[in-house]
Image (cartoon, rainbow, N blue to C red):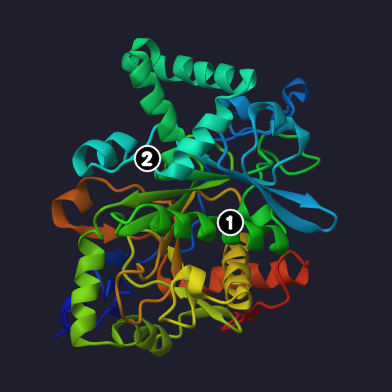
């Protein structure tokens, strides 16, 4: 009799070739059936039509010549004199004085709104938010920009923002400076020198140095939220790439959202940690080692194929498990960034992906590693999954391991990833 993998095996290949997985943390059941794993990766609808040169820098609202089509910046990173520099407190008139390599801006349509914190929790705007608002609204350009944002919001069924009282206007405008759903936006829409519309700039087209700064800027945004709002228990950090993965724009960006709950999954993990302080070693890393699912490593991070995910997934973990992202040393964080960048380089710009971050919230204790899960959104959940709660993942873990290792090795040969990355279990 063939054993049921849901009982004690997170990963099992049956005699007919079917692969059954059970996620060790969530219990999600995933099957891969024979004959589907080697199919070419689907590519989302795109166009190899030429780029209109008249639209340069204005392809979407996140582009560098449309700064005023987004909310007021909280911060930007510029490249100057061979280094990275962070600027804060810019007025609307100063936005075009420099080119932002990365921008931190409030989300115009928040998941968790300022009113959620203000009306449900009684949270007042901080002195910093009040000062930033007063500074930005002190110039004609700032006032015009805020009026422009009222027009944008009114076009999306928020008439109170467009025609409400002056006090209502002030409260919502203050939310741009004191809210807790931000977006980290990269500069490029297309790669430098692009001529076709399918040459989008993604995580994999950043240089390793640019990706390190992208990660460091995002980590700083997460830490800032915890510092500014003591009611936040978790900051969700994620990246949706391409519309099949939930992106509104085909322009590289991450999102950070403060919430007042850990969420069911995190609550369950923390409860299990009280019984098994080395839960993540026993539940995840030991099975990964047993089934040889490692892909690559750096001195301070490791990448492997995740077990029991709805989509083909690669996980990138910091080796030091007890640290929050901002408690990692600069070297450790850079090492983690290099490996995450290499995973994206192996994936390519054409594959829709979600990049989900998991880490230990600062109020909690225990060995919870910083880890990013890069999910390839290449299969569509349908009636079978809804009816059975058994998910069909089209690529089995070993095939995924070999595909990613092979592509990562090629990227290393071409000099597109950091030399700190060492490929493991590379197929011949």
Quadrant including the C terminus:
bottom right
> Which residue is most to the top?
163
Q: Which residue is mark 2?
A: 125
Q: Is residue 314 above or below residue 385?
A: below
N-terminal of the two: label 1 or label 2?
2
Q: Residue at x 38, y 55 (%)?
A: 236
Q: Secondary structure at mark 2?
A: loop
Residue at mark 1 to residue at mark 2: CA–CA distance? 23 Å
Q: Position of residue 231 (x, y in %)?
A: 28, 54
Q: Position of residue 30 (x, y in %)?
A: 28, 65
Q: Which residue is mark 1?
A: 217
In the foreground, 347 or 239: 239
In the foreground, 150 or 382: 150
**From this viewpoint, is residue 247 visible?**
no
Q: Are marks 1 and 2 in contact (CB under 8 Å)?
A: no
Local crowd size for mark 2, using a 10 Å CA cut-off: few (<14), some (14–19), many (≥20):
some
Q: Residue at x 32, y 41 (%)?
A: 124
Is label 1 or label 2 in front? 2
Q: Residue at x 73, y 28 (%)?
A: 51
Q: Position of residue 363 (x, y in %)?
A: 31, 69
Q: Is residue 370 above or below residue 156?
A: below
Local crowd size for mark 1, using a 10 Å CA cut-off: few (<14), some (14–19), many (≥20):
some
Q: Quadrant of residue 250?
A: top right
- Count up the numbered dots: 2
Q: Quadrant of residue 75?
A: top right
Q: Position of residue 279 (x, y in %)?
A: 28, 84
């Amino acid at each position: 009799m063939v054993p049921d993998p849901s009982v004690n095996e997170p990963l099992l290949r049956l005699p007919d070739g079917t692969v059954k997985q059970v996620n060790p943390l969530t219990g999600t059941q995933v099957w891969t059936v024979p004959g589907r794993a080697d199919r070419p990766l689907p590519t989302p609808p795109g166009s190899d039509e030429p780029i209109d040169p008249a639209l340069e820098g204005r392809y979407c609202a996140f582009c560098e010549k449309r700064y005023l089509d987004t909310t007021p910046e909280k911060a930007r990173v510029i490249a100057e004199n061979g280094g990275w520099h962070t600027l804060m407190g810019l007025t609307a008139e100063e936005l075009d004085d420099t080119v932002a390599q990365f921008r931190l801006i409030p989300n115009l349509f928040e998941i968790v709104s300022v009113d959620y914190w203000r009306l449900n929790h009684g949270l007042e705007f901080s002195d910093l938010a009040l000062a930033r608002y007063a500074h930005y609204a002190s110039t004609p350009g700032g006032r015009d920009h805020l009026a422009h944002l009222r027009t944008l919001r009114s076009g999306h069924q928020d008439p109170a923002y467009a025609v409400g009282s002056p006090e209502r206007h002030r409260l919502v405008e203050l939310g741009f400076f004191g809210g807790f759903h931000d977006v980290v936006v990269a500069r490029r829409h297309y790669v430098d020198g692009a001529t076709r519309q399918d040459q989008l700039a993604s995580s994999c087209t950043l240089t390793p140095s640019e990706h390190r700064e992208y990660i460091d800027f995002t980590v700083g945004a997460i830490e800032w939220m915890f510092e500014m709002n003591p009611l936040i228990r978790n900051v969700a950090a994620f990246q949706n790439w391409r519309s099949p993965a939930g992106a509104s724009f085909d322009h590289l960006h991450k999102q950070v959202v403060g919430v007042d709950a850990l969420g069911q999954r995190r609550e369950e993990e923390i409860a299990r940690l009280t019984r098994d302080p080395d839960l993540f070693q026993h539940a995840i890393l030991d099975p990964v080692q047993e089934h040889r699912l490692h892909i690559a490593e750096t001195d301070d991070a490791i990448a492997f194929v995740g077990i029991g995910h709805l989509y083909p997934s690669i996980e990138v973990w910091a080796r030091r498990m007890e640290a929050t992202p901002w408690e990692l040393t600069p070297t450790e964080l850079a090492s983690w960034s290099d490996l995450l960048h290499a995973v994206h380089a192996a994936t390519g710009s054409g594959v829709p992906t979600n990049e989900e971050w998991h880490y230990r919230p600062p109020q909690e204790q225990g060995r919870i590693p910083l880890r990013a899960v890069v999910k390839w959104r290449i299969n569509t959940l349908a009636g079978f999954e809804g009816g059975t709660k058994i998910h069909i993942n089209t690529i089995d873990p070993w095939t995924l391991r070999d595909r990613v290792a092979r592509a990562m090795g090629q990227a290393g040969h071409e000099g597109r990833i950091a030399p700190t990355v060492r490929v493991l279990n590379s197929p011949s």
